[in-house]
Image (spheres, rainbow, N blue to C red):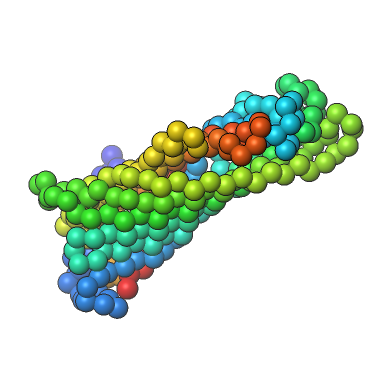
Amino acid sequence: MRSKKSRLLFLLTLFLGILNYADQALAQQPFTLTSWGRFFTGIDLGYQWISGDFVIPAGGRPGSGGRIYIGPDLGVDQTESISILGDGQILDNHFVNIEYFMCLATGLKRIQRELMFHNRLYPEDSLVDTRIDMNWLRMTYAFKFLDIESWAICPSFGLHYVRCGVSLNGETEKGLNTSNTRRLDAIYPTVGIQARYPAPYGLDFRLEWEGMHLITMGLISSFRLSTNFEIYPDVRFDFGFTHRMVSSVENNQTLNNEWFYNLTGVAGGVSFGF
C-alpha cells in the first residue's frame, strides 16, 4: 500500500513540476522571424494500420490484372510511418499546413489463390514478398471564420498529391522468381474544416478534416485529431490520431488501374518554432 501511495505521490509531483516548468517557460519570449506570423516545422513518427485493394493491368489489356486485397491476399496490414510537418499562423486569422507522409508496408505470405498483377500470374501456394510504398503530400490553407466559445472554426482549401508503388516478389506461373513493380499517382483538390482551441500552459487542440469526391477520378479524405504542447518557447511536442483514405480510377486506357487504401494511425513528434 505504501508503495502504491509513493508512486501516486511521485506522479503527482512530476505532473505539477511539468506544469510549473511550462508556466515558467511560457513566460519567456519566443523567437520569431517576423512580427506578422509564427511558424513551426518538425517530424512525427507513427504507426499505421492499413487496408485496401487494387487492380493493376498491363497496358489496359483485358485479363492482365485482377483485384488483389492487400490484407487477406498479401498479409500487409500494418507499418511504421514518418511525417515531415510544417504549419504557420499569419496575422492571427490565416493558417497554412504542409505535410509529407511516408510509409513502407511489407508482407510475406504463401498466397491462398491465384493472383494476376500487371500481366504476371502468381499461382496458389506460392510465397510472395510484398512492398507497398506510400508517399502523400498535403498542403492546406485555412482562415478563421468565427469563434465559438474560444474554438476557432476555419474553412480550408487544400491540394493532395498521392504516389503509391507496389512490388510483388515471388514465383510466377513460369517458375521464375521475379520482381514486379508498378507505381501510380494522383492529385486531388480538397475542401474542409478545421477547429482550433488554444488552451493554457501551451496546449493547443485541433481537429482537421478535408476531402473531395471526383466523379471520374475517385475520392480522398484526410482526418487528424491532435494535441500540441509547447513545453518551451519554440519547442513543441505533437501527438495525434490520423485517418487517411484514397481511392483512384485511372481512365486513360481501356482497362483502368484501380487502387484504394485506408490508413488509420497514431503519431507523435517534436516541432521547432521560428
Placement of 267 over or under 232, stated as above or below? above
- Residue 34 visible at all: yes
Q: Residue, x 85% and y 29% (percent of image)?
A: 173
* Count of numbered tags: 0
| Picture quarter with the C terminus | bottom left
Q: Residue furthest left?
A: 149
Which quadrant holds residue 16? bottom left
Placement of 17 over or under 209, stated as above or below? below
Q: Residue furthest right?
A: 175
Give how far across and how far down residue 4 sits, in percent: 30, 42
**In the shown orientation, is residue 119 left or right of residue 221?**
right
Give how far across and how far down residue 77 sits, in percent: 57, 34
Placement of 274 over or under 45, stated as above or below? below
Q: Could you say which is closer to the camera, residue 126 or residue 260?
A: 260
Which quadrant holds residue 211? top left
Give how far across and how far down residue 55 sits, in percent: 64, 31
**In the shown orientation, is residue 119 left or right of residue 68?**
right
Q: Could you say which is closer to the camera, residue 110 or residue 116?
A: 116
Q: Residue, x 48% and y 54% (percent of image)?
A: 137
